[in-house]
Image: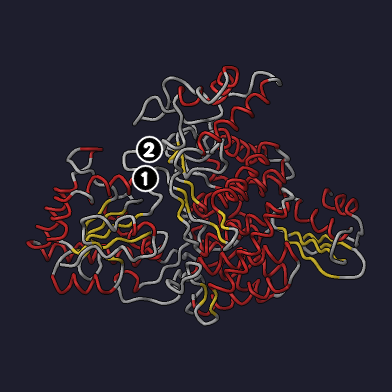
Amino acid sequence: MPSNQLASEPSAYLKSAAHQPVHWSPWGDAAFARARQEKKPILLDIGAVWCHWCHVMDGESYEDPAVAELLNRDFVCIKVDRDERPDVDARYQRAVQALSGQGGWPLTAFLTPEGEVFFGGTYFPPDNNAYGRPGFHRVLMEIARAFREEQERVTTNARAIRDHVVQTLDEAKPGAVTPDLVSGAADQMAKLFDVRYGGFGSAPKFPHPAAIEFLLARWHDSRGGLAWQREIVEKTLTGMARGGIRDHLGGGFHRYSVDERWIVPHFEKMSYDNSELLRAYLSANQALGTPLFKEVATGIVDWVLDVMADKDNPAFATSQDADLTFGDDGDYWTWTLEEATTQLTVPEGAVAARVFDIQETGEMHHNSKKNVLWWKQDPASDDEWPVLRTAMKKLKDARDRRKAPFVDRAAYVNWNAMMAGAFLQAGAVLDRPECNALALKVLERIWSEAWDAERGMSHVLGRSEPRGMLDDNVQSAAAFLDAFEATGESTWLERATLVMTYCGTAHTDGTAGYFDIAGTSGTAYLATRAKPVQDAPTPSPNGVAALVLAHLWVLTDKSDWRERLDLQLGAFAGSARELSLHGSTLLRAVDWAVHPVTRIEVAGPRGDGPACAMHLLALQTYRPRKVVVRKIAERPAATVCIGTSCSMPVSTPEQLAGLLEA
């Protein structure tokens, strides 16, 4: 009987299970071959190192010798890191959702030896009736019995689910690309808006930064005429900024809120969430000039630089865990009244308690004394603000002395590209050159270590496999274009062009839309390629691809890119309105196609002077659908083109500011 095979795996999530008595195998042909040879069903566990309920299920079930004995006897067990293999996760999520109506992590799926799902769910408690779900031991016994005794039913179920998954993997639905598509989708988003607390829907409540950027553009285009669009943007960003979903001491955001008021979060911090939220707060600060939004963006940057950035081997980490140990629920991030007040003077403690609602009874169910810090009210007077700032610094210093949750240093290409692009925007808007310097080093590393002209981008910096995922390619291309706008160096434009040319070959088959993987594998659902367009939870790669095509068209003025953009959007336009909130990235690209774009061209010598100042001003100024082109010339000059109408050249930052305001 094989032992646990995870100790040598590079994934932190898989390594964390190497000590378990379950005979885990990594995803691969060997595990499926053993299942066929031994005629056993497969237990597939998909999770992540940052996932709270994955740790819970590990501690309750997979570390239980009795459960392990049952699993090792009757199943072949495969463990997958969803961050390492998003292609595997996407397909099995669909299968389990078709069965149970619910997805998420941990994903617990039972497969035939051919890799087809016949039963599944998410978290299973160890005992019956806990959380209203059947106990895991009982589930395992029943699944093993059914596989032995009801092969025909198992096979029929598996084939039906497979047919459903294959049919739904292609999300392309042709339609007309019109301005009505944009306005109609905005109206649909408004219906989901929570007018009391901001955000969309009810608990649990997730940030939707792409929707915020989409609606901010709609408000700006109306020249302030549609107040409801601004209200959605401001109330949502303010609600998150004041809520416990934001880390008020260390900066950055936790993954989502379990309540509708944004107060109690799931405490893991994700790179992809924070890169998108950084962009949303920067854009809102550019457009609205709100000091709070600048403060929040600054906090995200500070957290990334302090915790997530590897400056020696330039890269951004993937995530920071919610918890330290099994049974812990955000204890690192939360405070009892006694824990807080022992760090502070009496006046500091009083101000902090009022502002952050620190009470004897807090918000955490597992420990009723634990408080989430959320901004309940402003200090009562100007004199209290410096007292509060001193208190916050002391609490941050005290928290830093606690053992911090694990940071996953795996450097995924797609998420590194996303953060690099956001850092380039932050470098300009916040005037922080260190953001630009780090972002450009990360992007140079992506180009030198991940790119292969024949096989596209790899998924992890420093590793050749896995590779062939659309998201790594299009996110890299998007960030390369950000680098081109930020630096004016044509190399970045050339690299983005090469990547998108590769995608046009490796990720298409002559029809419109891009496939999520470059090739197919014979293992189960991976034999079918998908065309995803939903933002779930990261921006959809087809939506990002459309945005890249739009930028390439405006930056190069080549009709070929516009033709590709029109084909791309036409392939998915039939589902854009109904997707609404969950199709925001694609809708942002539709906006580029149907409304005038702004092209700001700045020429002049490099180095300090009017041209450099105008370039920075162009990057700092908010305009929806904007590109900035920097050219080298003897004399400074800038032009602004909106649609097909261009200004006369101007030569000073003051003159350019006047043009942009007009």
User: Looking at the image, which residue is at 66% across and 66% down?
Assistant: 481
Q: Residues within 10 Å of mark 1 (few under 14, many from 20)?
A: many
Report the amino acid beneath label 1: His
As helix, strand or loop, the secondary structure at mark 1 comes to helix
What residue occupies the far left of the structure in this picture? 149
User: Disc 1, disc 2: CB below 8 Å?
Assistant: yes
Mark 1 vs 2, N-terminal side: 1
Q: Is residue 210 visible?
A: no
Q: Is residue 623 above or below residue 489?
A: above
User: Looking at the image, which residue is at 44% across and 26% down?
Assistant: 336
User: Looking at the image, which residue is at 47% across and 36% down?
Assistant: 333
Residue 632, how many percent across, how many down? 84, 70
As helix, strand or loop, the secondary structure at mark 2 comes to loop
Which one is in front, 579 or 142?
142
Which one is in front, 22 or 255?
22
What separation in Å lies between label 1 and label 2 (alpha carbons)? 8 Å
Point out which mark residue 329 bears.
2
Residue 207, how many percent across, how many down? 52, 44
Image-quadrant location for residue 418? bottom right
Relative horizontal placement of residue 409, taking residue 613 as reference (left or right): left
Residue 294, how many percent across, how many down? 68, 41
Report the amino acid beneath label 2: Asp
Q: Is residue 109 above or below residue 519?
A: above
Which residue corresponds to mark 1?
52
Relative horizontal placement of residue 300, taking residue 49 as reference (left or right): right
The mark tally for this picture is: 2
Relative horizontal placement of residue 343, taking residue 61 as reference (left or right): right
